[in-house]
C-alpha cells in the first residue's frame, strides 16, 4: 500500500480504532491516545501492507494491541511505584491516624 492510499483511508481507520479504544477504556482521552499510537504503528507498516489485505481488520487488531499495551503499562506503573497502601483512619484522637500496609 502506498502512502497516498493510506492517507485516503486513514480517517475511516482512525474512527474504527477510536471506537475499539472507547469500548475498551470507556474514556475519550484514552481512546485518543490509543488511536494516535495505532495510527503511527500503521503508518510505519503501510509500505508492507498488501493492497488486497483487510486493512480495516488489521487496524482493529493494532488498536486492540495498543489498548492492552496501555493497560499493562498502567498496571505495572501502579504496582511498581506504590508498594504500600495508605489509609487514613479517623479516631477519637485529635489527629487522624495514617495506616500503611503492604500491597497484596
Image (tube, grey):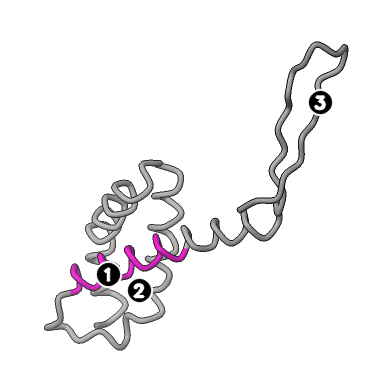
Q: Which mark is residue 97?
A: 3
Would you identify the image quadrant in which residue 61 lies? bottom left
Depth check, mark 3 against mark 1: the one in front is 3
The magenta segment: 55-69
The answer to whether 19 appears left or right of 73 in the picture is left
Q: Residue 44 magenta-drawn?
A: no
Q: Which mark is residue 61?
A: 1
- Callout 1: SS: helix
Label 3: few (<14), some or many (≥20) within 10 Å?
few
Cα distance in 3D space between marks 3 and 1: 48 Å
Q: Nearer the viewer, residue 51 or 59?
A: 59
| Residue situated furthest front in the rendering | 92
The answer to whether 92 appears left or right of 85 in the picture is right
- The number of discs equals 3
Q: Residue at label 2?
A: 42
Q: Nearer the viewer, residue 23 or 47?
A: 23
Q: Position of residue 82 (x, y in %)?
A: 70, 52
- Determine the residue positioned at 28% across, 54% down: 20
- Determine the residue positioned at 46% across, 58% down: 71
- Determine the residue positioned at 41% across, 79% down: 44
Cα distance in 3D space between marks 2 and 1: 11 Å
Cα distance in 3D space between marks 2 and 3: 52 Å
Q: Residue 63 magenta-drawn?
A: yes
Q: Position of residue 27 (x, y in %)?
A: 40, 41
Would you identify the image quadrant in which residue 83 lies? bottom right
The answer to whether 1 appears left or right of 81 in the picture is left
| Residue situated furthest right in the rendering | 94
- Callout 3: SS: strand
Image quarter (top left, top right, bottom left or bottom right) of the N terminus: bottom left
Amino acid at each position: 500500500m502506498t502512502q497516498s492510499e493510506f492517507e485516503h483511508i486513514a480517517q475511516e481507520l482512525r474512527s474504527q480504532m477510536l471506537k475499539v479504544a472507547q469500548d475498551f477504556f470507556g474514556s475519550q482521552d484514552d481512546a485518543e491516545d490509543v488511536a494516535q499510537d495505532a495510527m503511527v504503528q500503521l503508518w510505519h507498516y503501510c509500505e508492507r501492507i498488501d493492497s488486497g489485505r483487510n486493512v480495516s481488520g488489521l487496524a482493529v487488531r493494532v488498536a486492540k494491541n495498543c489498548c492492552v499495551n496501555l493497560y499493562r503499562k498502567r498496571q505495572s506503573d501502579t504496582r511498581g511505584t506504590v508498594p504500600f497502601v495508605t489509609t487514613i483512619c479517623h479516631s477519637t484522637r485529635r489527629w487522624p491516624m495514617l495506616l500503611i500496609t503492604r500491597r497484596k
